[in-house]
Structures are given as structure tokens and as C-alpha cells.
Image (cartoon, grey):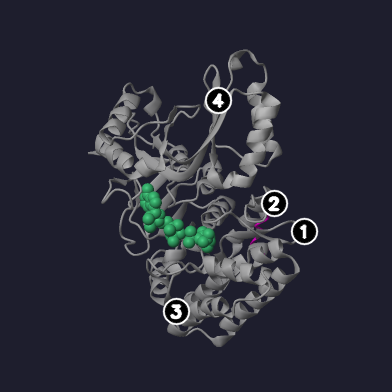
Amino acid sequence: MKVVKFGGSSVADASQFKKVTDIIRSDDRRKVIVVSAPGKRNANDTKTTDLLISLGESINNGSKDEQIYNKVMDRFAEIAKDLNISGEVLGRIEKRIKEACEAVSRDYIAGLNALKSCGEDGTALLLSAYLQSSGLESSYVNPKEAGIFVSDEPGGALVLDESFDHLYELRRRDEILVIPGFFGYTPEGKLVTFSRGGSDITGSIVAAGVKAELYENFTDVDSVFCVNPTIVDNPKKLSTLTYKEMRELSYAGFSVFHDEALIPAFKEKIPVCIKNTNNPAGQGTMIVNKREEKDGHVIGIASDKGFLNLYVSKYLMNRELGFGRRLLQILEDEGISFEHAPSGIDDMSVIIREHQLPKEKEAVVTRRIAEELHVDTITVERDMAMIMLVGEGMNQTIGIASQAATAFRHANVNIEMINQGSSEVSMMFGIKSDGLASAVQSLYRTFFS
Ligand SMILES: Nc1ncnc2c1ncn2[C@@H]1O[C@H](COP(=O)(O)OP(=O)(O)O)[C@@H](O)[C@H]1O
Ligand SMILES: N[C@@H](CC(=O)OP(=O)(O)O)C(=O)O
């Protein structure tokens, strides 16, 4: 049995639904289907999830934006019309969206989660109806019915262990099951979504639960590339990656697969295959537990903007027991999570995502650090980017850092920070954001040309 997830780009319009149906029909092991909400049809389009979020915000600000509401409904109506799906299905979708809009007025956070889930829910209803009308026996399965139970963390839910046994029961069903991705229910019955891009997580949870032979993740690229294809033209395709490599790469910027989505599949050792809905015959990328050719080379370069460096220095910091703990405690008190914390004898840097430390909070945090830790210097440098070189065994290979440093020099980009850290499979470089593209291109030439 295979679990197959189709991302937003794969269900963006009726012609994509037809490709999805052909893919499902072509292999009778494709029994459990997880879908996202309709994504962008072209570069200037808006994802349905983003429309739903804007709709929820408008309700919260006091007046429901009817234009956005109509845009959401039009997207579903157009797909239904082009696929000849009955008005009853569209009526069900509309009813759910209206109920979620009312829920937003009562309780913004809970209501917004319900509203966000309508994108995936509507897609699942439409797809199962279309599969039926195409002669494939199929049912829509709500995540509650499937037994996807999650923690009560709206917009960032985590799966609860009990889900996996419930999901195993789905194996008893004969027809093709279509499950909306991106959300689950707390044991008390409250709908909660995963973080953005979370349909990948649903797919992985379901694959682990039903003990699938393969988790196929269909998107709009032929494979995972060794570098973001929007930064380097025609980059090298990766045929195989390990779970560990992919998790590092996703976390550090490979948006093609959610970084949290690997864990359930990894625990059950279910291989993951990333494939293209627009070219299903292509080989795709396999993500597995072990890769044969561990040649010690860099296999991927991930990058992301939007970081800051909170830097503190204090003479004799090395002698002050508990300094690091107290600094990180202040961040914890203020609800700020950090990414990396490289340190020197008298200095410590904490790398934080910029959205975690808005300007108002920055003032509070820096004042507390200055007053409570009596530091000599404290600075906050924004507009930082992180570049991660990833590859199993890479850190045992001599010369990677020096080759990387040469690549940065060729790109004329100053390295602000290097962190080989505790990960066995990655090396991180911090630079100013404006040098990101040229640094990544230069690293690509060094390691892949
Ligand atoms: N290293 C990479 N390899 C492949 N795609 C990448 C990579 N980094 C970023 N991407 C982007 O990820 C996109 C696919 O992910 P996403 O937009 O979430 O698809 P979906 O609509 O299927 O959920 C690609 O179109 C590509 O632009
Ligand atoms: N629709 C949700 C969840 C998701 O996984 O979407 P996509 O498959 O388009 O990345 C989002 O936009 O966050």
C-alpha cells in the first residue's frame, strides 16, 4: 500500500485534478491519498490557504471581506464546474466555510484554524467525488474519522502517538481514501492545524500509521535539487538522500518538503519519494535510511534569509559559571526560540529568526541582558542569512571548510560566522543577506560543477 500526498500546485485547478486522477489510476497500490488546498496556478496567483487567512483576519478586524470570500468560493466552484461535480459537494464546502467564518467571530485562534483547514477539506471532498465519477471507488475521510489526534498548539500542532494505531485501521478499507492534509483534532475534539506546509506532515503520519511500503509526495518539480532552483539555474538533481540529510536541508530552506514531515516516516523506516505531478514518469528523489555512496561530499546547499545575530561579549565570560544558561533563560522567559548559539572565550552569539524578536521585544531583551548579565557589549545585527552545507560523512572529510571559505571569497562575501556544531551532517555559515545569491552560486560551482 502506498500513501500519496498531492501538494497545492498539484490540485490548483481542474486540469491538475485530472493528472492526479491519472496518477492514482495508474497504480492500484495508491490507496490512501492526502491533499493540500489549491495552490498557485501561476506566479501571480494566491494560495487558497493565504486567502482563507486574509478572510479570517478581516473578520477579526470587524468586517468580513466579501471579495476574498468570493475568491475562495470561486476557486472551488471553478474546479467543481470544470470537473462536472454536483452542486451538493460545493454546498458542503460552502457550509463548512460559513461555519468557520462564524467560529472566527467567536474565538479568533480556534476559528482561524477551522477556516484554514477548509482549503484542504474542500479539495478532499472534490477529489473523492471526482474519483467516484471517474469510476474509481473512493471515500472522503475526515482526519477525526481517520484518528489523527494532535496537541492543542494552533498553527503548530504535533501528532499524538495514539494516532498511529487508529490509522492502522484504515488498512481494512478497500476503496481509495482521500484525507485532507494540514490538520487534526485534539482528543477533546478541537480542530488544530499543523504549521504552514503541513500537508506533508499529514502524509507522513498517515504513511507511518498504515505502515505503507512507500510515501509518495507529488509536487511541481522533477526532484529535490541540490540547491534552491530559484537561486541556481538547472541545478543537479538528487536521486537519493537520507532522512537526516533531508531533514537538515528542509529545516535550512529546502521548502519542497516540510522539515517535520520526515520524523513519522523515519520512525517506521518508510521510504519517501518526491515526484512531479506534471511528469510522473520521472524518477524523482528517494529519501531513505541509508545511502550507499557515502563519499563524504556535500550533497546539498540550503539557504534562508530572515535571521539576526544577538551578540554579547564580556571579559572573563569563560570563568562565569552559568552565563550561557542565564542568557538563554532570558530568551525563554520572553518566549523566543533560538536556532544556533556559537560561543568564544569572552563572546557568545545567538542566532534567532527575525520574526521571533520584533523591535519592541528587542528593547526588552537587550535591556534585561545588559542589566542582569552585566555584559560589556550587546549588539543585534539583522538581515542575516544562513547557508547550510549538508552531506552524510562530510564532517569527516578534510578540506570542506577551506573549499567553502574560498567560494565565499570568490563571491566577495564576508563570512560572519561558521558553526560546524553538533550535527554530523552539516556545516553552517552566517552572512549578510545581500550576499546570499552570489555566495550560494559560488558554493554550487565549487561543490557541484
Ligand atoms: N532544493 C530544492 N529542490 C526542489 N525544489 C525546491 C528546492 N528548494 C525550494 N524548492 C521549491 O519548492 C517548490 C515545491 O514545494 P511547494 O511549493 O511546497 O509545492 P507543493 O505545491 O507541491 O506543496 C518548488 O517549486 C521549488 O521552487
Ligand atoms: N495549504 C497549507 C498546507 C500545505 O501543505 O500546503 P502546500 O502543499 O501547498 O505546501 C499551506 O499552504 O500551508
Q: Which of the two labelled residues, at mark 4 and mark 3, occupies the earlier sequence position?
A: 3
Q: Which of the two labelled residues, at mark 1 and mark 4, occupies the earlier sequence position?
A: 1
Element on which disc 1 rests: loop
CA gap, disc 3 to disc 2? Answer: 37 Å
* Between 20 and 356, the one nearer to me in the picture: 356
| Residue 61 visible at all | yes
Element on which disc 4 rests: strand
What percent of the width, then of the height, locates residue 252?
Answer: 46, 42
Residue 151 is marked as 2
Residue type beneath disc 2: Ser
Q: Is 149 part of what is drawn in magenta?
A: yes
Q: Spot the residue most to the left.
A: 449
Residue type beneath disc 1: Glu
Q: In which quarter of the image is ligand 1?
A: bottom left
Residue type beneath disc 4: Met
Q: Which of the two labelled residues, at mark 1 and mark 3, occupies the earlier sequence position?
A: 3
In this rendering, the answer to whether 359 lies above or below 123 is above
Residue type beneath disc 3: Ser
CA gap, disc 1 to disc 3? Answer: 37 Å
Element on which disc 3 rests: loop
What percent of the width, then of the height, locates residue 69?
Answer: 57, 77
**Do the residues under discs 2 and 4 have CB atoms within 8 angstroms?**
no
Left or right, residue 388 beside residue 357: left
